[in-house]
Image (cartoon, helix red, strand yellow):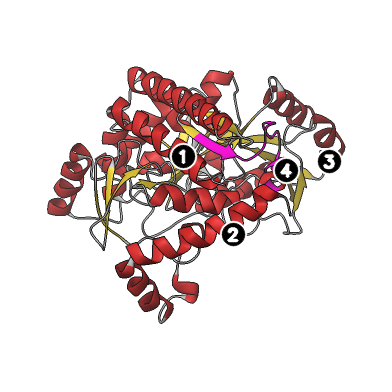
Amino acid sequence: MTSLDATNAGQLQHLLREYRERTPGSETAFRRALRVLPGGETRAVTTYPPYPVAIARGRGSRLIDVDGHEYLDLVNNYTSLIHGNAYPPVSAAVTAVLEDGLVFPSPHDRQLELAELLVGRVPSVERVRFTNSGTEASVLAARIAQRATGRSQLLMFDGGYHGSAPPLLAKDPAVIAVPYNDIDAVQVALTGEVAAVFAEPFLGAGGVVPAAPGFLHEVQELARSRGALFVLDEVQALRNGIGGEQGRLSLTPDLTILGKIIGGGLPIGAVGGRADLLLLTASTTRGHLMHSGTFNGHLAAAAAGAVTLHHLDATDIERLDRAGGFLAERIIQAATRAGLPMSVTRAGSILNVHFTSSAPTNAADVRAAAGPLLPALHLALLLQGVYTTPRGMISLSTVTSDEEVEAAAVAYENAFNRLNAR
């Protein structure tokens, strides 16, 4: 154990004690949850030692926990709240739906408006089919690809996340996983049995690792040359451009997986893409691929998503990108002054800190850089009233002010100084 590791181990114990003293209400909520929820949670990513902060309410860029502490929200429900918490236009749209009826067994104007917006914003999306989550959308995209190609296997990237159900998991027999940013590995793995290559414009849950220049273009063309579909997962990435990251990167995927911001904070997912592929699911197509769901295109989610997209324009996206760049630079500077190795990977307004001086290029690099400094940093930030993720990811919103970004930078500097205190 290095002197820094030993110092950090001691600091982590101090942070844990301070956290417990500060959050007795959250601990009570966690003990209550343990009696009815396995492990005290129903969403694995939201838990961390010794127990998670229990949030009571959120407004704009702020969260309030059950003990009355206020936090600057740098998570925004893992990128889904592009306009922050309880965004008034979204709340008004959902309230209007409540008065008319939440769900009907028929198409509705609110579904059509959201579908038209998506088709209008993303050039590769000619038709859209709604689901209730990004996971469901990914499963549907896999089924479409398998039907269209007559093949069974799916090529994915280590560290990529397309949902928590088969056939989306690395250990599933139908999945071949290769390292991100490794075109040679793709060439070897992309056999005649592969129905589709599933890719993210950057590894989201895998550490916000951007694609190397030209990598995704090569993957797209290689997939097509071998008769496979190219499926781009823009569940997180759509926020980074009017047409998503695919517009910025000049990609034309056969299918696009959508979610997060298109529901404005409510559960939703969608598959968009080439009309001929989506028509495989149409009930008017002979021998069509059956796809249904009681809440597909839920009216409240559709209404909230349409308002969210209407209020997200190029100016907003550019400001978020600048804020993300500013915060990344300030975090690296602060870590350097504190004598800590640090890199920050970034895709627009989504960032991830890594305790390594070399920016990771794949998920293996991210895992190698993980260690006790990350959970200690997370706790040190929470104790300063900055709510971020245990894995080091940051997601900004349009209501995060320049002053709040500056305050976040200062909080990181304070946290780094505490972690490296001798």
Task: List the residue tagged with mark 2.
Answer: 165
- Kind of residue at disc 1: Ile
In the picture, the disc for residue 195 is 4
Going by the numbered disc 4, the residue's amino acid type is Ala
Instruction: Estimate the spatial distance between the alpha carbons at disc 3 and disc 4, rounded to whole Å.
Output: 12 Å
Counting residues from the N terminus, which is met first, the one under dot 1 or under dot 3? 3
Q: Does the magenta stretch include residue 366?
A: yes
Mark 3 or 4, nearer chain start? 3
In the image, residue 255 lies at what x, y percent? 57, 35
* Element type where label 4 sits in the image: strand
Which image quarter holds the N terminus? bottom right
- Front in this rendered view, residue 196 or 322: 322
On the image, the x and y values in percent for residue 312 come to: 32, 27
Q: Is residue 370 above or below residue 402?
A: below
Label 1 belongs to which residue?
394
Residue drawn 47% across the image and 58% down it: 15
Comparing labels 1 and 4, the label whose residue is closer to the camera:
1
Q: Earlier in the sequence, mark 2 or mark 4?
A: 2
Q: For the magenta stretch, what is the residue range?
A: 351-367
